[in-house]
Every structure is written in structure tokens, then in C-alpha cells.
Image (spheres, rainbow, N blue to C red):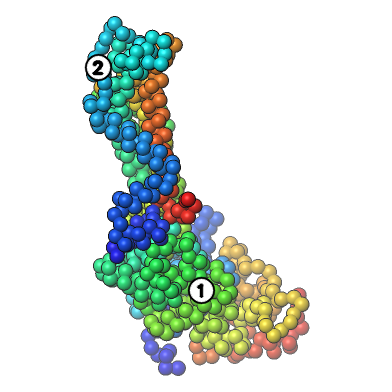
């Protein structure tokens, strides 16, 4: 029997036994995933988007930057005037929309996921510290949070990006640093109630130190609400990135992101709606996939919800 | 008695734990002294809010903000726990002194298997490998009387019944063979049949492991079941302390007598159960003099003016009441002699 299987917080008794009989944990997780429709859907969507991003050069039919002045704003294939050469049409410079959407996934995914990871980690750690220790640490951190909330986010972003310039890494970091406050607030609130719970006192009564209590006993318990917020904020991050592009401080051309395409496509909404619609659709579907996957993950990490599964 | 000569395992002297709230200072525990000898089981009894739980938390060093130990000593094997650092306290907790809480469901982390939670304390204090900790855990689960231990190891708290969860809590508390076990109302959240089982289990394990037990309860039935000595607390003070048989047979403090009279007895039929009139005074308007006198049937002029000290009426038997100032008085006789005043 492998002892480490006992430490997995997210598995029910039966699963634990399967593991103890020597089943590969990856297969076990995969089985758990297949049991949930939402989880499977989310997983397929996210996997597809990731593969698209990684193999964009192989998948995309055209060079996303290849302009064709003779074929500007061509509609998608199913509309009148559309050709099967450009399935999703072309943009205002005659570039193939499908190829651009495919390439755009790279940057959008990087920004969406990593800035949420940056923001989430900062918020999680500071929120736990503030909630757990209380007193002046809490006061200090929460006043910082207030300060961040008082300044409009976009203004802050503009200032920082104006100073440091805009490239992928700074963009991810800056979006992370400006968004951590939501997580810190949420996590602090959760920790405030959790730390008064009996099992935390019980953990203390067996001689556990503060660090272990915070990161081993409290952290897994705030994870469910944390996952919900972070999956939702992938979407907002992509939109913020779009508005930054619109203001000229986001991703700079020729690099493409869905947000950038969305904001440039807005000018042609009345005449060529597909310029903004397809990147928008791509954002929506990706976010939906991430939310589904997050929802499943939250369920699986809570041992109590396992009984309710089919 | 010879036992009295021995150094006690735990000696609490004049313990004062105050809570500094926005409305002023609340003296939850106000000058409490008691001791526990090795292998002894004692109980602290009293109404809700009399300070019995705070006393136990003080011993564990778990008094949360805004509470603070303001004075007194807690000598555990002659070390003063109030003077130990957090780190030193941590090595004692769970290892030498451990605690069982009232609510077995909320006292277990819902996200971890019970096996993991038991082995956690073993790994923490005995610095053994996961494998050995697991073996010991399965042993402990067996010891607290749960069959099929290796299967239970992998269950989550919500999959177990209340009684089983409390057994798991006991397993956690006793995993490192502590010298002192503090049980804070361990049976309150359980139904009566399970209560009896849990008490029996605690009695058996105490014999086996030679652990002293400090039982916090308001259930006199539980006290009679398993305790050697009883401490009765009222409004943050010890009002009576002594051998369980003597105390049950002939309570010396009017408050203890009231508690006894308000417990239903199986061979007595009464229309209405006795109740102590009035309520526990709030700490903000504690009466001068004896804290119990506004509710006391034996109250005298003196009680109003001067607070009684804890008097030793017999060897090892203490009462905080003016009635016994000039020697021991039998309350029942006293009660019959005096016409009841309401």
C-alpha cells in the first residue's frame, strides 16, 4: 500500500483503495474527469485551445500577417461573397481571420492564465496572512487593498505600463499585480471564519505550528471559492488586455491577441461584424472551458461532494 | 493521604484569564487553583459561562484574542506553562497534554482522511516515517474500538458517525501517549448510548495508558461515572472542591446543592424539577461579596459584604462559603432549620 495516497485530499474512500492497489494516479484522475460531463467538456475545450496555441504555425492555413488589399473585409464562408479559402473571412487589411484567431490564442492564453496565477498567488498568500494573523498585519494589508481599490485599475495599468513599456512579460506581471486585491479580500474573509473553526483549534491543540496551519489546514479549505473567482477572472483579464490594446498600451502589433482583435474589430462592427465576433467568441468559449474545468476541480477537491456524483 | 504528598502532575495556582473586550475587562477565570495528580481523573463542573472551558484553554495555551492570562501559574511537571514560549508550548501540545473537543464533526478537518489526521500528530511529535506513523495510526484506530481500522484510515470525517468521529478525536489526542488529557465536554454532542460508550472507552484507555484526565462538563451523570475528584466553578471561581463521593453525598456549597437538586433522579418523582433562581451575574455587574449570594437560599448579611475565601473544611475538601466558617455544616439540616425565604 502506498502511504502517500492517503494524503490526497480530493479522493473518496473507494478511490483511495484503488490507489492502494497500485493504480496510476493519472489514470485515476482521468477516470474522475470522465465521470463528470462538465469536467469533460471543460477539459476538451481547454485542451483544444492549448493544442491550437502550441501548434498554431502547423494549424493556421495562412500567415496571420499576410495582407491582401484585394480581398479586404471578406465575409465568412457561409455568407454571400464568402469563399472557402477564408473560412472566417478576412479583416480590414485582407488578413485571414481564422489564422489570426488561431495565432491570437497564444498570447491570450498566456496572459489570461499566467496573470491570474500571479494575481492569485499574491492574493492567496497575503489574504491568508492577513486573515490568520489579524491585528496590524491585517490592518496594513487591508489598507493597501483599499488603496488599490480606490485607484481605478485601468489608470494604474496605464501608469505602470507607460513607465515600463509593454511586452508580454510586463503585461502579465502588471495585470497580476493590479488584480491580486480581489483574491486577498476574498481569501482573508474566508480565513477569518475558518480560523475560528474547531478543527483549526484542534490542529493547534496537537501542536501544529502557524505555517502548517495556514498552508496545510486553511489553504485547502479556501481553495473552492478561490478557484471560482480565478476562473471567472481569466475572462476579465482578457477583456482588460483588450482595452489596453485599444488604448495602445497592450500587446503591440504585429503580435496578435484576441483582445487586440476585438478592440480593432469594433470599428467595423456595422459593416463587417465578423472582425470582432470571432475573437470574442474565442474568448467566450475558452473562458467557458476554464470555468467548467474549475468547477469540476472544485468538486473533486471537496471530498463531501463525491457522494453526490453519479 | 499518601497521594497528596506526591508532586501533582498539573498544579494550577491562582490562574487569572481575562478578556479585554470593548465593553471592559471580563474576568472569565478569576483566581482558580486546583491540581491533578498522576493517573487521576478530575472534573470541572459548572454552568455555561462559568469559566470552565477558558480554564482548560488556558492550560493548553490556546486562549484566543482578546483573552489573556493575567496572572497565576500553571505548573505542569513543575514547568510553568505560562512562561513557556510558543515553540515550547507546541512541543507539549498533542504530545504531553492533549485535548478532546465538544463537537467531533467540526473538530476534524473535512478535507483530509481521518487516518491522515491521526498520523499527522504522530509524525509531528515522534519524528517517525510515514510508514511507521501509518502503522501506529491503524493501531490507534483499533485501540479506540473501531473495527476495520485499515479501511477507516481512508475515510473522511463526513463518512463517519458522531460516535466514531469522537473516537477518532480520542485517537488523535492519545496517539502520542500524553500525560494529561483535557476533555472539554466530550459527550455533549452525542446521544446517550454513545455517551456511555465514549466514557467507557476513556476509562479503559486511561487504565491502559495511565493518563490523567481533566474532564470539563456540566453533566453530573458523567462526573459520577468516571471521576475521582470534582471542582465546582461559579462565575470564574472555584466554589467547591473535593472527593466525588463526599461531594455527591453531601454537597457543602449552596450552589453545588442547587446543581444536584436540579438533576432528575431516577427513583424520585417530582412534579417540577428544582431550578436555581436567577441567572449567572454578568462580569460587568458582579455582586460585591460572595458572587452567589443573590441566588443563594442561605444568604446572610455577611455574604453581601465580604467575599468568602476557599476554606478547607476537611482534608483535601474545599468550599468557598461563609456557612462553613466555623466548622462544617450540613446543608440539608441547615435548610430544614431555616424557613425557606422566597
| Disc 2 residue crowd, few under 14, some 14–19, many 20+, Cα 10 Å | some
Seen as rendered, the residue at the extreme top is A70
Badge 1 marks a residue whose secondary structure is strand
- Quarter of the image that includes the N terminus of chain B: bottom left
| Disc 1 residue crowd, few under 14, some 14–19, many 20+, Cα 10 Å | many
Residue at image location 51% in from the left, 74% down from the top:
B216
Is B226 or B201 nearer to us in this picture? B201
Badge 2 marks a residue whose secondary structure is loop
Q: Chain of mark 2?
A: A
Q: Is disc 1 on the same chain as disc 2?
A: no
Q: Position of residue A254 (x, y in %)?
A: 24, 19
Q: Position of residue A130 (x, y in %)?
A: 39, 48
Is B225 or A43 nearer to us in this picture? A43
Q: Is residue B267 above or below residue B171?
A: below
Instruction: Determine which quarter of the picture holds residue B120.
Output: bottom left
Residue at image location 65% in from the left, 68% down from the top:
B279
Q: Is residue A189 visible?
A: yes
Instruction: Determine which quarter of the picture holds residue A156.
Output: top left
Q: Chain of mark 1?
A: B
Question: Which residue is tagged 2?
Answer: A65
Q: Nearer the viewer, mark 2 or mark 1?
A: 2
Q: Is residue A150 above or below residue B63?
A: above
Q: Position of residue B289 (x, y in %)?
A: 60, 73
Q: Is residue B127 above or below residue B1?
A: above
- State if disc 1 and disc 2 touch (CB < 8 Å): no
Residue at image location 45% in from the left, 82% down from the top:
B204
Q: Position of residue B221 (x, y in %)?
A: 58, 79
Seen as rendered, the residue at the extreme bottom is B1
Question: Which residue is tagged 1?
Answer: B216
Seen as rendered, the residue at the extreme front is A84
Q: Is residue A185 visible?
A: no
Amino acid at each position: 500500500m502506498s502511504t502517500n495516497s492517503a494524503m490526497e485530499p480530493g479522493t473518496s474512500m473507494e478511490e483511495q483503495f484503488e490507489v492502494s492497489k497500485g493504480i496510476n494516479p493519472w489514470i485515476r484522475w482521468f477516470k474522475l474527469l470522465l465521470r463528470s460531463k462538465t469536467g469533460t467538456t471543460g477539459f476538451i475545450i481547454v485542451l483544444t485551445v492549448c493544442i491550437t496555441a502550441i501548434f498554431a504555425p502547423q494549424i493556421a492555413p495562412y500567415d496571420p500577417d499576410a495582407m491582401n488589399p484585394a480581398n479586404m473585409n471578406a465575409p465568412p464562408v457561409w455568407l454571400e461573397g464568402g469563399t472557402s479559402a477564408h473560412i472566417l473571412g478576412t479583416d480590414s487589411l485582407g488578413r485571414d481571420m481564422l489564422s489570426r484567431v488561431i495565432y491570437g490564442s497564444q498570447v491570450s492564453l498566456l496572459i489570461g492564465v499566467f496573470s491570474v496565477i500571479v494575481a492569485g498567488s499574491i492574493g492567496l498568500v497575503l489574504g491568508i496572512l492577513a486573515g490568520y494573523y489579524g491585528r496590524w498585519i491585517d490592518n496594513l494589508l487591508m489598507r493597501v487593498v483599499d488603496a488599490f481599490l480606490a485607484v481605478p485599475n485601468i489608470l494604474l495599468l496605464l501608469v505602470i505600463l507607460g513607465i515600463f513599456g509593454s511586452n508580454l512579460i510586463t503585461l502579465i506581471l502588471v495585470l497580476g499585480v493590479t488584480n491580486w486585491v480581489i483574491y486577498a479580500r476574498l481569501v482573508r474573509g474566508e480565513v477569518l471564519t475558518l480560523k475560528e473553526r474547531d478543527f483549526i483549534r484542534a490542529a493547534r491543540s496537537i501542536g501544529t505550528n502557524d505555517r502548517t496551519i495556514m498552508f496545510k489546514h486553511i489553504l485547502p479549505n479556501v481553495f473552492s471559492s478561490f478557484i471560482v473567482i480565478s476562473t471567472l477572472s481569466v475572462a476579465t483579464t482578457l477583456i482588460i488586455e483588450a482595452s489596453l490594446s485599444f488604448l495602445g498600451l497592450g500587446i503591440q502589433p504585429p503580435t496578435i491577441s484576441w483582445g487586440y482583435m476585438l478592440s480593432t474589430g469594433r470599428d467595423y462592427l456595422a459593416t463587417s461584424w465578423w472582425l470582432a465576433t470571432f475573437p470574442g467568441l474565442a474568448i467566450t468559449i475558452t473562458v467557458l472551458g476554464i470555468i467548467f474545468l474549475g468547477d469540476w476541480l472544485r468538486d473533486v477537491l471537496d471530498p463531501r461532494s463525491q457522494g453526490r456524483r453519479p | 493521604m499518601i497521594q497528596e504528598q506526591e508532586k501533582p502532575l498539573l498544579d494550577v495556582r491562582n490562574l487569572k484569564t481575562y478578556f479585554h473586550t470593548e465593553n471592559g475587562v471580563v474576568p472569565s477565570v478569576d483566581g482558580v487553583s486546583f491540581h491533578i495528580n498522576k493517573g487521576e481523573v478530575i472534573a470541572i463542573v459548572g454552568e455555561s459561562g462559568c469559566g470552565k472551558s477558558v480554564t482548560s484553554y488556558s492550560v493548553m495555551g490556546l486562549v484566543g484574542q482578546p483573552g489573556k492570562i493575567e496572572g497565576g501559574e500553571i505548573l505542569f511537571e513543575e514547568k510553568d506553562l505560562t512562561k513557556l514560549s510558543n515553540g515550547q508550548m507546541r512541543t507539549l501540545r498533542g504530545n504531553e497534554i492533549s485535548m478532546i473537543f465538544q463537537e467531533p464533526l467540526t473538530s476534524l478537518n473535512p478535507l483530509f482522511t481521518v487516518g491522515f489526521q491521526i498520523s499527522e500528530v504522530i509524525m509531528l511529535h515522534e519524528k517517525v516515517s510515514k510508514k511507521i506513523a501509518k502503522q501506529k495510526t491503524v493501531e490507534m484506530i483499533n485501540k479506540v474500538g473501531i473495527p476495520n481500522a485499515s479501511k477507516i484510515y481512508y475515510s473522511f470525517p463526513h463518512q463517519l458517525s458522531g460516535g466514531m468521529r469522537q473516537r477518532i478525536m480520542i485517537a488523535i489526542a492519545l496517539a502520542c501517549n500524553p500525560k494529561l488529557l483535557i476533555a472539554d465536554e466530550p459527550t455533549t454532542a452525542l446521544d446517550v448510548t454513545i455517551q456511555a460508550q465514549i466514557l467507557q472507552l476513556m476509562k479503559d484507555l486511561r487504565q491502559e495508558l495511565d493518563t490523567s484526565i481533566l474532564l470539563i462538563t456540566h453533566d453530573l451523570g458523567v462526573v459520577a461515572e468516571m471521576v475521582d475528584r470534582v471542582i465546582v466553578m461559579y462565575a470564574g471561581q472555584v466554589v467547591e472542591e473535593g472527593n466525588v463521593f463526599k461531594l455527591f453525598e453531601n454537597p457543602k456549597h449552596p450552589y453545588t446543592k442547587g446543581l444536584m437538586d436540579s438533576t432528575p433522579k431516577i427513583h424520585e418523582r417530582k412534579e417540577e424539577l428544582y431550578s436555581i433562581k436567577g441567572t449567572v451575574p454578568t462580569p460587568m455587574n458582579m455582586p460585591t461579596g460572595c458572587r452567589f449570594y443573590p441566588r443563594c437560599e442561605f444568604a446572610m448579611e455577611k455574604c453581601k459584604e465580604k467575599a468568602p475565601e476557599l476554606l478547607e473544611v476537611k482534608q483535601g475538601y474545599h468550599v468557598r462559603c461563609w456557612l462553613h466558617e466555623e466548622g462544617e455544616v450540613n446543608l440539608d439540616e441547615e435548610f430544614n432549620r431555616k424557613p425557606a425565604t422566597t
